[in-house]
Image (cartoon, helix red, strand yellow):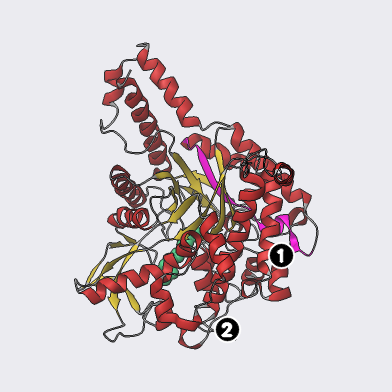
Amino acid sequence: MEARFPVLALMLCFSLAVGSSNPVSLRSADSGVSSSFPSNFLFGTASSSYQFEGAYLSDGKGLNNWDVFTHTPGNIADGTTGDIAVDHYNRYQEDLDLMSRIGVNSYRFSISWSRILPKGRFGGVNQAGIVHYNNLINELLQRGIQPFVTLTHYDIPQELEERYRAWLSPQIQEDFRYYAEVCFISFGDRVKHWVTFNEPNVAAIRSYRSGIFPPSRCSGSFGNCSHGDSETEPYIAGHNMILSHAAAVNLYRTKFQVTTTHFPPRMLGIFNLLMKFNVQKEQGGSIGLVLNALWYEPISDSTEDQLAVERALAFFMNWFLDPAIFGRYPEEMRQVLGPKLPEFSSYESRLLKRIGLDFIGINHYTSFYIKDCMFSSCEQGPGASKTEGLALRLEQKNGSYIGEPTAVDWLFVYPRGMEKIVTYIKERYNNVPMFITENGFGQTRDILNDVRRVDYMSSYLDALETAVRKGADVRGYFAWALLDNFEWTSGYTTRFGLYQVDFPSLKRIPRLSATWYKNYIENFIFKVATRGASSL
Ligand code: GBH
């Protein structure tokens, strides 16, 4: 399947070249500035299964950890659940129409693990689940929209929790590998971008340090839980996530992605034949990992605060990216955590390094100041403890916020953070291809004339373009989100949609940002087309 921008761009190019439209008048409709993004750049919107689908007991889906968690009183701000969410499971056709209207060429969504494997590997494959995602993928491709698919976005079959405590047990690696295999076999002929995990950093922290996500585990002053150990469990869970990721990537590389002849044909001919036999089908896609990425500015110019910024990055993001690319944890983490940080065997380490990542997915929304707590003492707060890297996260410096505050308590508008985080990742990881897999703006009121969201997106996209102009290999941008949806512990009180969802009628109503994004993409296509035309 082909991306639709190159096709459209070619059509536009053609019409300009043959003079069927007036290039001058066309150009005047545009700012006249060219775009730094490559012509095959993906523009899309993002979603996740639990936040969008609803249909929580339909067609054989098994219970997942979020079903159980939201049904326990007291966990969600407004007492709601994702039982219905925005009913995307049933209304996906209508939602794809909205995407077509905006003109995106990609859609990032996640598969509900318990819809495919209601009991993990301890039960059968739910065919109705396979049928659902097949329909979704086929409908997307018919519209010229590429599927960009995440295997797990926080939701896992409850069965795994009950059998062996999910991410706390190495057994989950086998379950994740098996689930990935079912997905590659079923959808890999058409899905060319795979993500193993959405934000394993946030999942590990919120499930096992602060305990605000299922299975609600934490200890001491980190939260209010009846079980858990905030100082060790996030790292055990994270370790099993990394090794699960590795199992899926290794499987994809060896059995699905591509058939490479590993040995000259005359030598070891039988071996090659066996390798070929083992390969399901050459799918030729790519596979990566998505992290939540915060940018940090030091609270002062001191060396101590600058080192603290490095630690904050290590403890939040490089915690996963370093193992996935270099096969080891960041030095800063090993120094501070000592034996509390699990270790990779030399086999695991070599495997991780060898398989690597085809791309890094970056969910970037906001930035914070960082104050050192290693050489000076800090009040308690996020990041201040040893287990979080002794780097206190602050919103303000000398009484002013790092960026304009918003209705979402953790979200400050600091577009330079986008340029800086992308540049940092580019430099640390040798410019491996990147996608902005999420970026967006939350509100707590029903505002259709969402000028602040438009300002936010346009300034963050500008900052992203600056990073690309300076050489960052960024290949796509996904707005979070097409629709208002279930915002985890905030329930439906926080709204990130380009379309407002009217509850309970579930009617989708376009906000100003939907129209703005549509125009932005149209302008981009125009710029790409004229870029081509001027070289004719
Ligand atoms: C993403 O999470 C999720 O992928 C998506 O499902 C969600 O709907 C979207 O963003 C909007 O929230 O943790 O308070 O110390 C991002 C959630 C919130 C995680 C801010 C990192 C950093 C500050 N992020 N958080 S805090």
Q: Residue 63 carries which label?
A: 1
Q: At 50% from the left edge and 82% from the top edge, which residue is drawn?
A: 340
Q: Residue 228 carries which label?
A: 2
Q: Badge 1 local density, few (<14 within 10 Å), some, or many (20+)?
A: many
Q: At 69% from the left edge and 64% from the top edge, which residue is drawn?
A: 174
Residue 418 falls left or right of residue 508: left
Q: Does the magenta stretch include residue 59?
A: no
Q: Badge 2 local density, few (<14 within 10 Å), some, or many (20+)?
A: many
In the depicted view, which residue is nearer to us: 348 or 487? 348
Relative to 146, say whether 302 is above or below.
below
Q: At 32% from the left edge and 38% from the top edge, which residue is drawn?
A: 36
Relative to 349, say whether 462 is above or below.
above
Give coordinates of residue 53: x percent, y percent: 63, 53
Q: Which of marks 1 and 2 is in front?
A: 2
- Give the amino acid at mark 2: Gly
Which residues lie in the magenta part? 103-122
Q: At 49% from the left edge and 45% from the top edge, which residue is drawn?
A: 509
> Which of the image's four quarters has the N terminus?
top right
